[in-house]
Image (cartoon, helix red, strand yellow):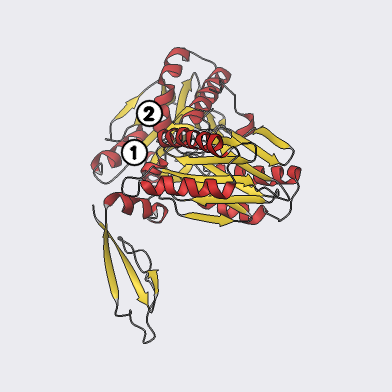
Amino acid sequence: MSILEYNGGCVVAMAGKECVAIAADRRLGIQLQTLACDANRVFRMHDKLFLGLTGLMTDITSLHNSFDFKLNMYSMREGRLMSPQTFSSLVASTLYEKRFGPYFSEPVIAGLNKDNTPFLCAMDLLGAAAYADDFVVSGTCAESLFGTCETFYRPDLGPDDLFETISQAMLSALDRDCISGWGVTVHIITPEGVTAKSLKARMD
Amino acid sequence: MLGVLYFHQQGNAAEKLAMDGGIGQGKKGEKGECCESLVGVKMSAELMELASMDWTNTEHMMGTTIMATAFDGGVVMGADSRTTTGSYIANRVSDKITPITDKVWCCRSGSAADTQAISDYVRLYTAQHAIELGQEPRVKTVANLFREICYSNKANLMAGIICAGWDQFSGGQVYNITLGGSCVQQPFSIGGSGSTYIYGYCDSNFRENMTRDECVEFVKHALALAMARDGSSGGVIRMVIIDSSGVQKVFIPGDKLPMAWQG
Protein backbone atom coordinates (compact mmCIF):
# COMPACT_ATOMS: atom_id res chain seq x y z
CA MET A 1 0.00 0.00 0.00
CA SER A 2 1.45 3.36 -0.95
CA ILE A 3 2.16 6.13 1.55
CA LEU A 4 -0.70 8.21 0.13
CA GLU A 5 -3.10 5.41 1.08
CA TYR A 6 -1.77 4.89 4.60
CA ASN A 7 -4.44 6.94 6.38
CA GLY A 8 -7.12 6.87 3.67
CA GLY A 9 -9.58 9.64 2.87
CA CYS A 10 -10.91 11.66 -0.01
CA VAL A 11 -12.15 15.14 -0.89
CA VAL A 12 -14.33 16.45 -3.72
CA ALA A 13 -15.31 20.01 -4.63
CA MET A 14 -17.97 21.12 -7.11
CA ALA A 15 -18.98 24.46 -8.60
CA GLY A 16 -22.50 25.77 -8.92
CA LYS A 17 -24.04 29.12 -9.79
CA GLU A 18 -22.22 31.63 -7.55
CA CYS A 19 -21.53 28.88 -5.04
CA VAL A 20 -19.10 26.05 -4.43
CA ALA A 21 -19.39 22.93 -2.29
CA ILE A 22 -16.56 20.91 -0.79
CA ALA A 23 -17.07 17.48 0.75
CA ALA A 24 -14.73 15.12 2.58
CA ASP A 25 -15.01 11.84 4.42
CA ARG A 26 -14.17 11.56 8.12
CA ARG A 27 -12.19 8.36 8.44
CA LEU A 28 -8.74 8.22 9.95
CA GLY A 29 -7.11 4.82 9.84
CA ILE A 30 -3.81 3.02 9.94
CA GLN A 31 -3.90 1.00 6.73
CA LEU A 32 -7.00 -1.14 7.09
CA GLN A 33 -7.73 -0.45 10.76
CA THR A 34 -10.06 2.44 11.51
CA LEU A 35 -8.92 4.69 14.33
CA ALA A 36 -11.35 7.58 14.29
CA CYS A 37 -14.50 8.77 12.53
CA ASP A 38 -14.09 12.47 13.26
CA ALA A 39 -10.98 13.46 11.33
CA ASN A 40 -11.00 16.87 9.63
CA ARG A 41 -9.73 17.21 6.10
CA VAL A 42 -11.43 20.42 5.05
CA PHE A 43 -10.22 23.70 6.51
CA ARG A 44 -11.67 27.19 6.31
CA MET A 45 -8.99 29.65 5.23
CA HIS A 46 -11.50 32.50 5.15
CA ASP A 47 -15.22 32.82 4.49
CA LYS A 48 -14.81 32.47 0.74
CA LEU A 49 -11.87 30.07 0.61
CA PHE A 50 -11.71 26.45 1.70
CA LEU A 51 -8.84 24.00 1.49
CA GLY A 52 -9.29 20.24 1.43
CA LEU A 53 -6.26 17.99 1.91
CA THR A 54 -5.96 14.23 1.35
CA GLY A 55 -3.16 11.77 1.94
CA LEU A 56 -0.97 11.34 5.00
CA MET A 57 -2.72 12.87 8.01
CA THR A 58 0.44 14.19 9.61
CA ASP A 59 1.26 16.11 6.43
CA ILE A 60 -2.33 17.38 6.24
CA THR A 61 -1.94 18.81 9.74
CA SER A 62 1.48 20.32 9.00
CA LEU A 63 0.35 21.89 5.73
CA HIS A 64 -2.81 23.28 7.28
CA ASN A 65 -0.85 24.92 10.09
CA SER A 66 1.66 26.30 7.60
CA PHE A 67 -1.02 27.79 5.34
CA ASP A 68 -2.94 29.28 8.27
CA PHE A 69 0.25 31.02 9.34
CA LYS A 70 1.06 32.30 5.85
CA LEU A 71 -2.49 33.53 5.32
CA ASN A 72 -2.50 35.39 8.63
CA MET A 73 0.83 37.07 7.80
CA TYR A 74 -0.51 38.04 4.35
CA SER A 75 -3.71 39.60 5.76
CA MET A 76 -1.70 41.53 8.32
CA ARG A 77 0.75 42.88 5.74
CA GLU A 78 -1.72 43.46 2.89
CA GLY A 79 -4.74 44.43 4.98
CA ARG A 80 -6.99 42.24 2.83
CA LEU A 81 -7.97 38.62 2.40
CA MET A 82 -6.02 36.44 -0.03
CA SER A 83 -7.78 35.66 -3.29
CA PRO A 84 -8.28 32.00 -4.26
CA GLN A 85 -5.97 32.31 -7.27
CA THR A 86 -3.17 33.71 -5.15
CA PHE A 87 -3.74 31.04 -2.52
CA SER A 88 -3.47 28.28 -5.10
CA SER A 89 -0.11 29.70 -6.19
CA LEU A 90 0.98 29.78 -2.55
CA VAL A 91 -0.01 26.13 -2.09
CA ALA A 92 1.73 25.09 -5.30
CA SER A 93 5.00 26.77 -4.40
CA THR A 94 4.91 25.43 -0.83
CA LEU A 95 4.56 21.90 -2.20
CA TYR A 96 7.17 22.31 -4.95
CA GLU A 97 9.69 23.65 -2.42
CA LYS A 98 9.82 20.04 -1.23
CA ARG A 99 10.17 18.59 -4.72
CA PHE A 100 12.63 15.84 -3.76
CA GLY A 101 11.13 15.01 -0.38
CA PRO A 102 7.48 15.93 -0.81
CA TYR A 103 4.57 16.34 1.54
CA PHE A 104 2.39 13.28 0.92
CA SER A 105 -0.79 15.23 0.48
CA GLU A 106 -2.87 16.26 -2.53
CA PRO A 107 -4.86 19.45 -1.96
CA VAL A 108 -8.17 20.66 -3.31
CA ILE A 109 -8.95 24.38 -3.20
CA ALA A 110 -12.51 25.69 -3.44
CA GLY A 111 -13.51 29.33 -3.18
CA LEU A 112 -15.38 32.30 -4.57
CA ASN A 113 -13.60 35.07 -6.43
CA LYS A 114 -14.19 38.77 -5.74
CA ASP A 115 -17.09 38.77 -8.22
CA ASN A 116 -18.54 35.61 -6.61
CA THR A 117 -17.65 33.34 -9.53
CA PRO A 118 -16.57 29.87 -8.35
CA PHE A 119 -12.90 28.91 -8.18
CA LEU A 120 -11.76 25.25 -8.13
CA CYS A 121 -8.27 23.83 -8.18
CA ALA A 122 -6.70 20.42 -7.50
CA MET A 123 -3.02 19.63 -7.13
CA ASP A 124 -0.82 16.59 -6.93
CA LEU A 125 1.66 16.15 -4.13
CA LEU A 126 4.36 18.10 -5.98
CA GLY A 127 2.20 21.15 -6.61
CA ALA A 128 1.09 20.69 -10.20
CA ALA A 129 -2.19 22.57 -10.30
CA ALA A 130 -5.18 21.73 -12.42
CA TYR A 131 -8.01 24.25 -12.61
CA ALA A 132 -11.56 23.18 -13.40
CA ASP A 133 -14.88 24.88 -13.73
CA ASP A 134 -17.00 21.86 -12.81
CA PHE A 135 -15.48 19.60 -10.15
CA VAL A 136 -12.17 18.48 -8.68
CA VAL A 137 -11.38 15.31 -6.73
CA SER A 138 -8.55 13.93 -4.63
CA GLY A 139 -7.87 10.94 -2.41
CA THR A 140 -7.87 7.17 -2.35
CA CYS A 141 -11.11 6.83 -4.31
CA ALA A 142 -10.35 9.63 -6.76
CA GLU A 143 -10.98 7.38 -9.74
CA SER A 144 -14.42 6.41 -8.42
CA LEU A 145 -15.16 10.06 -7.64
CA PHE A 146 -14.30 11.08 -11.20
CA GLY A 147 -16.86 8.57 -12.41
CA THR A 148 -19.66 9.60 -10.07
CA CYS A 149 -19.04 13.34 -10.48
CA GLU A 150 -18.94 13.08 -14.26
CA THR A 151 -22.29 11.31 -14.16
CA PHE A 152 -24.13 13.48 -11.64
CA TYR A 153 -22.73 16.93 -12.38
CA ARG A 154 -24.73 19.58 -14.19
CA PRO A 155 -23.61 23.23 -14.61
CA ASP A 156 -25.17 26.19 -12.78
CA LEU A 157 -26.74 24.36 -9.85
CA GLY A 158 -28.11 26.36 -6.93
CA PRO A 159 -26.77 25.74 -3.40
CA ASP A 160 -29.41 23.14 -2.47
CA ASP A 161 -29.13 21.17 -5.71
CA LEU A 162 -25.35 21.39 -5.53
CA PHE A 163 -25.45 19.92 -2.02
CA GLU A 164 -27.59 17.01 -3.22
CA THR A 165 -25.37 16.36 -6.22
CA ILE A 166 -22.06 16.45 -4.40
CA SER A 167 -23.47 14.29 -1.58
CA GLN A 168 -24.69 11.57 -3.94
CA ALA A 169 -21.41 11.61 -5.89
CA MET A 170 -19.45 11.27 -2.65
CA LEU A 171 -21.60 8.54 -1.08
CA SER A 172 -21.59 6.36 -4.19
CA ALA A 173 -17.83 6.59 -4.55
CA LEU A 174 -17.25 5.88 -0.83
CA ASP A 175 -19.20 2.64 -1.08
CA ARG A 176 -16.45 1.29 -3.32
CA ASP A 177 -13.44 2.27 -1.22
CA CYS A 178 -12.29 0.35 1.85
CA ILE A 179 -10.23 3.13 3.35
CA SER A 180 -12.57 6.09 2.99
CA GLY A 181 -15.92 6.72 4.55
CA TRP A 182 -17.28 6.50 8.07
CA GLY A 183 -19.13 9.81 7.69
CA VAL A 184 -19.04 12.83 5.37
CA THR A 185 -18.97 16.60 5.95
CA VAL A 186 -20.13 18.99 3.24
CA HIS A 187 -19.49 22.75 3.23
CA ILE A 188 -21.54 24.91 0.85
CA ILE A 189 -19.96 28.31 0.26
CA THR A 190 -22.16 31.13 -1.04
CA PRO A 191 -21.71 34.93 -1.06
CA GLU A 192 -24.08 35.07 1.92
CA GLY A 193 -22.13 32.63 4.05
CA VAL A 194 -21.07 29.05 4.64
CA THR A 195 -23.31 26.11 5.55
CA ALA A 196 -21.80 22.96 6.98
CA LYS A 197 -23.70 19.67 6.87
CA SER A 198 -22.94 16.09 7.91
CA LEU A 199 -24.13 13.12 5.93
CA LYS A 200 -25.27 9.86 7.43
CA ALA A 201 -23.06 7.41 5.59
CA ARG A 202 -22.25 3.72 5.85
CA MET A 203 -19.96 3.11 8.80
CA ASP A 204 -18.01 0.29 7.24
CA MET B 1 12.80 -2.41 -6.49
CA LEU B 2 13.53 -0.14 -9.42
CA GLY B 3 10.82 0.40 -11.97
CA VAL B 4 11.25 1.63 -15.51
CA LEU B 5 8.91 4.00 -17.27
CA TYR B 6 9.29 4.10 -21.04
CA PHE B 7 8.42 7.23 -22.97
CA HIS B 8 7.52 6.89 -26.62
CA GLN B 9 8.63 9.97 -28.54
CA GLN B 10 6.55 10.89 -31.58
CA GLY B 11 7.92 14.20 -32.77
CA ASN B 12 7.59 16.42 -29.75
CA ALA B 13 4.87 14.46 -27.98
CA ALA B 14 5.91 11.97 -25.29
CA GLU B 15 3.46 9.24 -24.38
CA LYS B 16 3.65 6.62 -21.71
CA LEU B 17 4.41 3.37 -23.47
CA ALA B 18 4.60 0.62 -20.89
CA MET B 19 5.25 0.27 -17.21
CA ASP B 20 7.26 -2.22 -15.22
CA GLY B 21 5.14 -5.32 -15.26
CA GLY B 22 4.24 -5.03 -18.88
CA ILE B 23 0.78 -3.59 -18.63
CA GLY B 24 -0.49 -2.67 -22.09
CA GLN B 25 1.32 -2.67 -25.41
CA GLY B 26 1.71 0.99 -26.28
CA LYS B 27 1.38 2.64 -29.64
CA LYS B 28 2.86 1.04 -32.73
CA GLY B 29 4.54 3.05 -35.49
CA GLU B 30 3.10 3.46 -38.96
CA LYS B 31 4.84 0.38 -40.29
CA GLY B 32 3.26 -1.78 -37.61
CA GLU B 33 6.27 -2.01 -35.33
CA CYS B 34 7.24 -0.08 -32.25
CA CYS B 35 8.75 3.31 -33.02
CA GLU B 36 12.51 3.46 -32.88
CA SER B 37 13.05 6.24 -30.43
CA LEU B 38 12.55 4.84 -26.98
CA VAL B 39 13.84 6.61 -23.94
CA GLY B 40 14.02 4.65 -20.71
CA VAL B 41 13.89 6.57 -17.48
CA LYS B 42 14.81 4.91 -14.21
CA MET B 43 12.68 6.11 -11.36
CA SER B 44 13.02 5.57 -7.64
CA ALA B 45 10.99 2.91 -5.91
CA GLU B 46 8.74 5.39 -4.14
CA LEU B 47 7.76 7.31 -7.24
CA MET B 48 7.26 4.03 -9.11
CA GLU B 49 4.95 2.86 -6.39
CA LEU B 50 3.02 6.10 -6.59
CA ALA B 51 2.55 5.62 -10.32
CA SER B 52 1.68 1.92 -10.42
CA MET B 53 -1.80 0.69 -11.21
CA ASP B 54 -2.39 -1.70 -8.30
CA TRP B 55 -5.81 -2.81 -9.39
CA THR B 56 -4.59 -4.40 -12.60
CA ASN B 57 -2.24 -6.84 -10.93
CA THR B 58 -3.56 -7.35 -7.43
CA GLU B 59 -5.45 -10.52 -6.73
CA HIS B 60 -8.94 -10.38 -5.26
CA MET B 61 -8.79 -10.71 -1.49
CA MET B 62 -11.58 -11.28 0.94
CA GLY B 63 -10.29 -9.19 3.86
CA THR B 64 -13.32 -10.29 5.72
CA THR B 65 -14.85 -11.18 8.99
CA ILE B 66 -16.29 -14.69 9.25
CA MET B 67 -17.80 -16.46 12.22
CA ALA B 68 -19.62 -19.60 13.24
CA THR B 69 -21.24 -20.62 16.53
CA ALA B 70 -22.63 -24.01 17.50
CA PHE B 71 -25.81 -24.46 19.52
CA ASP B 72 -27.62 -27.58 20.65
CA GLY B 73 -29.00 -28.93 17.40
CA GLY B 74 -27.16 -26.86 14.83
CA VAL B 75 -24.87 -23.99 13.92
CA VAL B 76 -25.14 -20.31 13.05
CA MET B 77 -22.65 -19.11 10.43
CA GLY B 78 -22.11 -15.46 9.50
CA ALA B 79 -19.93 -13.36 7.22
CA ASP B 80 -19.59 -9.82 5.83
CA SER B 81 -19.80 -9.21 2.08
CA ARG B 82 -16.71 -7.27 0.97
CA THR B 83 -14.23 -8.46 -1.66
CA THR B 84 -11.33 -6.13 -2.38
CA THR B 85 -8.66 -5.61 -5.02
CA GLY B 86 -6.11 -3.52 -3.19
CA SER B 87 -8.28 -0.84 -1.61
CA TYR B 88 -10.94 -0.95 -4.35
CA ILE B 89 -14.06 -2.86 -3.39
CA ALA B 90 -14.55 -5.29 -6.24
CA ASN B 91 -17.75 -6.79 -4.86
CA ARG B 92 -19.66 -5.21 -1.97
CA VAL B 93 -22.38 -7.86 -1.79
CA SER B 94 -20.39 -11.07 -2.12
CA ASP B 95 -21.58 -14.34 -0.58
CA LYS B 96 -18.78 -15.89 1.44
CA ILE B 97 -20.78 -18.74 2.94
CA THR B 98 -20.85 -21.60 0.45
CA PRO B 99 -22.51 -25.01 0.63
CA ILE B 100 -20.47 -28.19 0.52
CA THR B 101 -23.38 -30.51 1.22
CA ASP B 102 -26.95 -29.78 2.26
CA LYS B 103 -26.06 -29.55 5.92
CA VAL B 104 -22.35 -28.69 5.82
CA TRP B 105 -21.32 -25.22 4.69
CA CYS B 106 -18.11 -23.22 4.87
CA CYS B 107 -17.12 -19.58 5.45
CA ARG B 108 -14.26 -18.45 3.21
CA SER B 109 -11.58 -15.83 3.93
CA GLY B 110 -8.27 -14.97 2.27
CA SER B 111 -7.68 -15.17 -1.45
CA ALA B 112 -11.03 -15.36 -3.25
CA ALA B 113 -9.65 -17.56 -6.02
CA ASP B 114 -7.95 -19.98 -3.64
CA THR B 115 -10.97 -20.49 -1.43
CA GLN B 116 -13.32 -20.91 -4.37
CA ALA B 117 -11.04 -23.55 -5.89
CA ILE B 118 -10.57 -25.37 -2.57
CA SER B 119 -14.29 -25.46 -1.77
CA ASP B 120 -15.03 -26.76 -5.29
CA TYR B 121 -12.56 -29.60 -4.79
CA VAL B 122 -13.94 -30.42 -1.33
CA ARG B 123 -17.49 -30.42 -2.71
CA LEU B 124 -16.41 -32.94 -5.37
CA TYR B 125 -14.57 -35.24 -2.97
CA THR B 126 -17.39 -35.06 -0.42
CA ALA B 127 -19.98 -35.96 -3.05
CA GLN B 128 -17.93 -38.94 -4.14
CA HIS B 129 -17.45 -39.99 -0.53
CA ALA B 130 -21.18 -39.68 0.19
CA ILE B 131 -22.00 -42.05 -2.66
CA GLU B 132 -19.72 -44.71 -1.19
CA LEU B 133 -20.80 -44.02 2.38
CA GLY B 134 -24.51 -44.17 1.61
CA GLN B 135 -25.25 -41.48 4.19
CA GLU B 136 -24.94 -37.75 4.62
CA PRO B 137 -21.24 -37.06 5.28
CA ARG B 138 -20.11 -35.98 8.73
CA VAL B 139 -18.96 -32.40 9.35
CA LYS B 140 -15.66 -33.76 10.69
CA THR B 141 -15.02 -35.52 7.38
CA VAL B 142 -15.59 -32.38 5.31
CA ALA B 143 -13.36 -30.39 7.67
CA ASN B 144 -10.68 -33.04 7.30
CA LEU B 145 -10.80 -32.75 3.51
CA PHE B 146 -10.33 -28.97 3.82
CA ARG B 147 -7.40 -29.55 6.15
CA GLU B 148 -5.77 -32.04 3.79
CA ILE B 149 -5.84 -29.64 0.84
CA CYS B 150 -4.84 -26.56 2.88
CA TYR B 151 -1.95 -28.29 4.64
CA SER B 152 -0.47 -30.05 1.62
CA ASN B 153 -0.59 -26.92 -0.51
CA LYS B 154 0.20 -24.42 2.21
CA ALA B 155 3.06 -22.84 0.25
CA ASN B 156 0.78 -21.87 -2.61
CA LEU B 157 -2.45 -21.00 -0.84
CA MET B 158 -3.81 -18.20 1.28
CA ALA B 159 -7.06 -19.54 2.72
CA GLY B 160 -8.68 -19.32 6.14
CA ILE B 161 -11.83 -21.45 6.26
CA ILE B 162 -14.46 -22.12 8.89
CA CYS B 163 -16.30 -25.36 8.17
CA ALA B 164 -19.55 -25.86 10.08
CA GLY B 165 -22.75 -27.84 9.87
CA TRP B 166 -24.97 -30.49 11.38
CA ASP B 167 -24.77 -34.24 11.16
CA GLN B 168 -26.82 -36.96 12.83
CA PHE B 169 -23.96 -38.32 14.95
CA SER B 170 -22.47 -35.26 16.62
CA GLY B 171 -25.06 -32.52 16.05
CA GLY B 172 -23.85 -29.00 15.36
CA GLN B 173 -20.07 -28.60 15.01
CA VAL B 174 -17.67 -25.81 14.05
CA TYR B 175 -14.18 -26.46 12.69
CA ASN B 176 -11.60 -23.73 12.06
CA ILE B 177 -9.02 -24.46 9.35
CA THR B 178 -6.26 -21.87 9.59
CA LEU B 179 -3.70 -20.55 7.08
CA GLY B 180 -1.13 -23.22 7.85
CA GLY B 181 -3.61 -26.05 7.54
CA SER B 182 -4.42 -26.82 11.16
CA CYS B 183 -7.96 -27.97 11.91
CA VAL B 184 -9.43 -27.44 15.35
CA GLN B 185 -13.00 -27.88 16.58
CA GLN B 186 -14.33 -25.03 18.71
CA PRO B 187 -17.70 -24.10 20.24
CA PHE B 188 -17.48 -20.87 18.25
CA SER B 189 -14.89 -19.61 15.81
CA ILE B 190 -13.96 -16.27 14.27
CA GLY B 191 -11.73 -15.71 11.26
CA GLY B 192 -10.53 -13.20 8.69
CA SER B 193 -8.75 -9.89 9.12
CA GLY B 194 -11.71 -8.31 10.94
CA SER B 195 -11.74 -11.01 13.59
CA THR B 196 -8.78 -9.43 15.38
CA TYR B 197 -11.05 -6.57 16.44
CA ILE B 198 -13.66 -8.77 18.09
CA TYR B 199 -11.66 -11.32 20.10
CA GLY B 200 -12.37 -9.37 23.28
CA TYR B 201 -16.06 -8.93 22.48
CA CYS B 202 -16.51 -12.62 21.65
CA ASP B 203 -14.57 -13.88 24.65
CA SER B 204 -16.64 -11.77 27.02
CA ASN B 205 -20.04 -12.33 25.39
CA PHE B 206 -19.96 -16.02 24.54
CA ARG B 207 -21.79 -18.34 26.91
CA GLU B 208 -22.10 -22.12 26.78
CA ASN B 209 -25.49 -23.58 25.80
CA MET B 210 -26.89 -20.48 24.09
CA THR B 211 -30.15 -20.90 22.22
CA ARG B 212 -30.42 -20.54 18.46
CA ASP B 213 -31.70 -16.94 18.71
CA GLU B 214 -29.03 -15.95 21.22
CA CYS B 215 -26.40 -17.30 18.82
CA VAL B 216 -27.88 -15.24 15.97
CA GLU B 217 -27.67 -12.04 18.04
CA PHE B 218 -24.12 -12.90 19.15
CA VAL B 219 -22.94 -13.39 15.56
CA LYS B 220 -24.79 -10.32 14.30
CA HIS B 221 -23.33 -7.94 16.88
CA ALA B 222 -19.81 -9.35 16.60
CA LEU B 223 -19.80 -9.00 12.81
CA ALA B 224 -21.19 -5.46 12.95
CA LEU B 225 -18.42 -4.39 15.34
CA ALA B 226 -15.73 -5.92 13.14
CA MET B 227 -17.18 -4.33 10.01
CA ALA B 228 -17.08 -0.91 11.66
CA ARG B 229 -13.39 -1.16 12.54
CA ASP B 230 -11.87 -3.23 9.75
CA GLY B 231 -11.44 -1.54 6.38
CA SER B 232 -11.50 -4.82 4.53
CA SER B 233 -14.83 -5.94 6.03
CA GLY B 234 -18.16 -4.33 5.30
CA GLY B 235 -21.28 -4.34 3.17
CA VAL B 236 -24.10 -6.56 4.41
CA ILE B 237 -24.27 -9.41 6.92
CA ARG B 238 -25.14 -12.79 5.51
CA MET B 239 -26.00 -15.61 7.90
CA VAL B 240 -26.77 -19.28 7.40
CA ILE B 241 -28.45 -21.28 10.16
CA ILE B 242 -28.19 -25.06 9.84
CA ASP B 243 -30.08 -27.59 11.94
CA SER B 244 -31.61 -31.03 11.56
CA SER B 245 -34.62 -29.73 9.67
CA GLY B 246 -32.69 -27.74 7.08
CA VAL B 247 -31.03 -24.48 6.25
CA GLN B 248 -32.25 -20.92 6.78
CA LYS B 249 -30.56 -17.95 5.15
CA VAL B 250 -30.66 -14.51 6.78
CA PHE B 251 -29.75 -11.22 5.09
CA ILE B 252 -29.14 -8.00 7.03
CA PRO B 253 -28.65 -4.93 4.83
CA GLY B 254 -26.16 -2.19 5.70
CA ASP B 255 -28.70 0.24 7.14
CA LYS B 256 -30.12 -2.37 9.52
CA LEU B 257 -26.80 -3.26 11.15
CA PRO B 258 -26.72 -2.88 14.93
CA MET B 259 -24.92 0.39 15.68
CA ALA B 260 -22.34 0.72 18.40
CA TRP B 261 -20.44 3.78 19.65
CA GLN B 262 -19.42 5.84 16.63
CA GLY B 263 -16.08 7.25 17.77
The answer, for residue A140, to whether it is visible in the render is: no
Residue at disc 2, secondary structure: strand
The correct choice, above or below, for A131 with respect to B141 in the image is: below
Residue on which the image places disc 2 = B175
- How busy is the neighbourhood of tag 1: few (under 14 within 10 Å), some, or many (20 plus)? many
- Three-letter amino acid code at the position of disc 2: Tyr
- How busy is the neighbourhood of tag 2: few (under 14 within 10 Å), some, or many (20 plus)? many
Left or right: residue A98 compared with residue A42: left
Quarter of the picture holding the N terminus of chain A: top left
Q: Position of residue B206 (x, y in %)?
A: 46, 15
Q: Say whether mark 1 and mark 2 are on the same chain.
A: yes
The correct choice, above or below, for B25 with respect to B146 in the image is: below
Residue at disc 1, secondary structure: helix
Q: Position of residue B197 (x, y in %)?
A: 42, 24
Instruction: Name, please, the residue furthest toward the bottom.
Output: B31
Residue on which the image places disc 1 = B146
Name the residue nearer the viewer: A27 or A103: A103
Badge 2 sits on which subunit? B
Q: Position of residue B50 (x, y in %)?
A: 36, 51
The correct choice, above or below, for A66 with respect to A139 in the image is: above
